[in-house]
Amino acid sequence: MAVRGRRYPLVIYTVMLSRWWTIVTAIGVAMLGLAWLGYSRGAESWRWLATGSVGVFCVILGVMIFLLRKSAYVQPFADHLRLATPFLRLNISYKRFRSAKSANVGMLFPKKSISKHMAEIIEPLATMTAIVIELNALPMSQSSLRFFLSPLFFKDKTPHLVILVEDWMRFSSDMESMRTGAHTSAPQKKQDSSILSRLPRK
């Protein structure tokens, strides 16, 4: 069985999906309300049925998004770091790593450098600490990765990833122990080479 560390949910996805499930579910409830209003007022059946169907779809979609909030995560393994989202599973070999440093989220993404929408997402996270993993090269082009990952995984166009988790210190320690192989080292028993240990036992 492969040696692996714990899973660390990606905060960016948790925050973004939390916003989306609330909006989508609210739209669904509103559509259901309109459908009921149309039904109670004797509107044509196809009108309130169509509205109600859209409402049910939105509510179901909202529940699905809610359940997926913490499905995106990073997980250290013995020879690679796994980054998983609902639409992407990426294994990044430690051989690609140049460095892994902590940095303040607000400093990585100043308000002037990002869109208003992204600034709203960053605002409650600005005081948090992220791990910036500098790489020799990304497993696939950054332009391709941007189809699957939030722009907040990239501070610029250099090969790197910005990883934001709740317990960044534990994640960093876990990842470094995997990279250096410290997780496999076990304390060895000291051999007793004294003269007394060689005496025959009664």
Image (cartoon, rainbow, N blue to C red):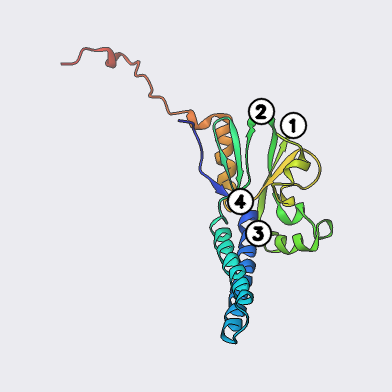
Sequence-first tag of 4 and 2: 4
Q: CA distance from mark 3 to mark 4?
A: 10 Å
Question: Residue placed farthest to the right in the image?
Answer: 112
Q: CA distance from mark 4 to mark 2?
A: 23 Å
Please tell me the numbered disc located at residue 95: 2
| Quadrant in which residue 95 is drawn | top right
> Mark 4 is on which residue type?
Leu
How many neighbours does mark 1 have within 10 angstroms: few (below 14), some (14-19), or many (20 or more)? few
Q: Which residue is mark 3?
A: 16
Q: Which residue is mark 4?
A: 10
Residue at x-position 72% and y-position 38%: 134
| Quadrant in which residue 76 is drawn | top right
Above-or-below relation of 114 to 89: below
| Quadrant in which residue 54 is drawn | bottom right
List x then y, in percent, for residue 58: 60, 66
Would residue 158 appear left or right of 168 to someone viewing this image?
Answer: right
How many neighbours does mark 4 have within 10 angstroms: few (below 14), some (14-19), or many (20 or more)? many
Secondary element type, mark 1: loop
Please tell me the numbered disc located at residue 136: 1
Residue at x-position 73% and y-position 64%: 120
